[in-house]
Image (cartoon, helix red, strand yellow):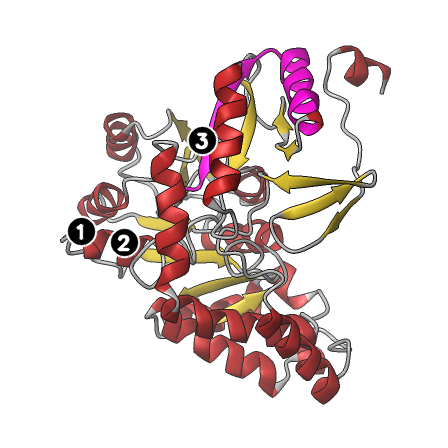
Amino acid sequence: MKEIEERGRKRSLLSVHPLSPPILVIEGQEKINFCSNDYLGLAQDPRLVEAACQAARDYGAGSKASCLVGGHYDLHEACEREVAAFKNTEAALILNSGYQANIGLLPILATRGDVIFSDALNHASLIDGCRLSRAKKEVYSHHDLEALEGALKKAAQARKRWIVVEGVYSMEGDVTPLPEILALAEKYEAYVYLDEAHATGVFGKEGRGLVEYFEDQGHSLKTDRLWQMGTFGKALGSFGAYVAGDRGWMDYVVNTCRSFIFTTALPPPVLGAIRKAVEIVPQESERRRRLWQWVKMFQGVSPIIPIIIGSEQATLHIHERLLEEGFFVQGIRPPTVPRGTSRLRLTLSASHTQEHIVAFKKVLERG
């Protein structure tokens, strides 16, 4: 701990109390939250809260068992059916978190004799999932499609090849070039594992993710080699994760994925909130319109806007100064990001107002 502190990397938990979004109370003072992943402002939506309460009244507070032991309620089944329809896939399966999904799914998809091609800036859960698999792992430079293709060529003798990417990179805010990735997968008979934690609900005219987003732009995507994983704890305002694809693959997950098999199923109130969010997100495009209005004001390509500072100490100092000004923006330091790239991770939400955005931009411009 002494070494961590000397390097400016000590982290500690900060107690916050949410008011009406995006306002938080921190140490008795109200702050405007600019580091939440609640991109559509649904986490405190009264409809999600009531859906969670109704599910608790109907089913109880907990699911009592793992899915295979008896915790897979008809509520789980209905939720999975609705998620599959939302993602335009044959089937879907609910898992307990994005981290659990990635460390459970990747080891059952890739094993000895296979090769995983992992983008250099992939999330820690994807890195850990790749490590837990027994496949050979090749890390290629971020978004470097030429390097990826070269690596795919060299691995022609591999049993299976998996390209592992994030849809929206959680610390960079940039978007994976999915059409080109899928084209390479088709050319070299590889498969694509797409983590849409930060894309679900945000991208596409109805918030269905990157496939819809790129098809809206005129791309014709072949998705038979695509696995789509995403979460409900960000734009959908609840908790948990999903994997979506064909029914045969979902059966395989049920029978082999340790992080699904050996854990208690998500509780009914969470499922109630998920179902309501999946209903709301495609219908209320005004939320996305407002969110993208704020994104454009920061000249971003997603609601995640990284402000690179460099040093860890300077990042902490600016974080504290912004807090004094009334803005909660988290400073991100190594090992989450590479050394020398410490940053403020600004995230935007449909719950922000024009006044919030203008006031924050003025503070930034003052330096």
Q: Is residue 340 left or right of residue 25?
A: left
For mark 1, give the secondary structure: loop
Mark 3: few, some, or many residues within 10 Å (few <14, many ≥20)?
Answer: some
State yes or no: residue 322 in magenta: yes
Residue 120 pos. (x, y %): 44, 28
Kind of element beneath mark 2: helix
Which residues lie in the magenta part? 302-323
CB under 8 Å between discs 1 and 2:
yes
Instruction: Assess disc 2: are there few (<14), some (14-19) or many (≥20) residues with their C-alpha within 10 Å of its C-alpha.
Output: some
Label 3 amino acid? Glu
Sequence order check: which comes first, mark 2 or mark 3? 3
User: In front: 320, or 360?
Assistant: 360
Number of numbered labels in the structure image: 3
The foreground one among 243 and 190 is: 243
Cα distance between the residues tagged 1 and 2 = 7 Å
Residue, disc 1: 217
Residue at (65% x, 56% y) in the render: 20
Viewer-proximal residue, 18 or 219? 18
Q: Amino acid at mark 1?
A: Gln
Question: Please, is residue 260 above or below residue 289 in the view?
Answer: below
Pointer 3 residue: 172
What residue is pinned by disc 2?
213
Query: Quarter of the image holding residue 338?
Result: top right
Q: Quadrant of the N terminus?
A: top right
Residue type at tag 2: Tyr
